[in-house]
Amino acid sequence: MLSIPEFKTEHLIVSVLTSQDFQLLNKYENDNRRHLALWEPFRDDGYFCLNESKNRAAAHLRDYELGTSITLIAYDDRKSEIICMCSFSNIVYGPFQACNLGYSISEKYQGKGLMFEMLQLSLQYIFDEVKLHRVMANYMPENVRSEKLLNRLGFQKEGLAKSYLKIAGSWQDHILTSKLNPNHLVI
């Protein structure tokens, strides 16, 4: 089994989501159900059951161990609550060395810079330790908070994907962005 990294920022403790975190995950998802519904695929009531959170947490840990996805969570300083999460999914190695980034933050912590704090550290980990070359993140045009966050993190706009993802029950356009590993020289 791989070791589980843990990082500290000024306000957060960041670590890989593990099976032991399923109760915190369940609370986070239930507390933010309405808040996140606008930006995520439709979720039925079963998704929010404790057992389903347990299954998802175990699946995230398996994916981490396989190297196909890394889901990080940011706790408060007592590890009693998940404040925000991010997932580096669809990890591809070889000549591509890239992944997709998704993220969410608890409604009550929006606007405090905590998502930026987490993603800044998480991207450093992905570039320095995992050694990926490219991270892609996409957002719906009306999601101004995500646009500002990705701009602040140094993501570059690459285009518009029409009818890209089915979010909240309908197909939504997305702005495509990416950030390249600053340690890799582009030749």
Image: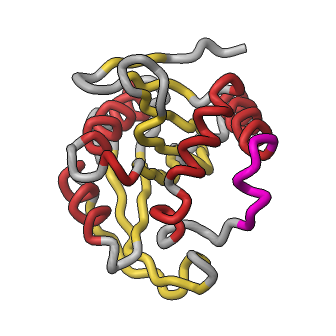
112, above or below 45, in the image: above
- 49 magenta-colored: yes
Q: Nearer the viewer, residue 30 or 139?
A: 30
> In this figure, what is the number of numbered marks?
0
Q: Nearer the viewer, residue 176 or 18?
A: 18
Q: Is residue 49 left or right of residue 105?
A: right
Percent of width and height locating residue 170: 59, 86
Percent of width and height locating residue 61: 69, 30
Q: Is residue 76 left or right of residue 87?
A: left
Percent of width and height locating residue 140: 40, 75
Residue 174: name its quadrant: bottom left
Residue drawn at (22%, 52%), measured in percent from left and top? 111
**Residue 62 visible in the current orientation:** yes
Quadrant placement of the N terminus:
top right
Q: Is residue 181 left or right of residue 15?
A: left
Residue 14: name its quadrant: top left
Residue drawn at (31%, 62%), measured in percent from left and top? 146
133, above or below 20, in the image: below
16, above or below 3, in the image: below
Magenta-drawn segment: 44-51
**Residue 187 visible in the current orientation:** no
Q: How is the image coloured?
A: secondary structure
Percent of width and height locating residue 6: 46, 17
Residue 143: name its quadrant: bottom left
Q: Nearer the viewer, residue 14 or 132?
A: 14
- Main SS type for the magenta part? helix
Residue drawn at (68%, 66%), measured in percent from left and top? 43
- 11 magenta-colored: no
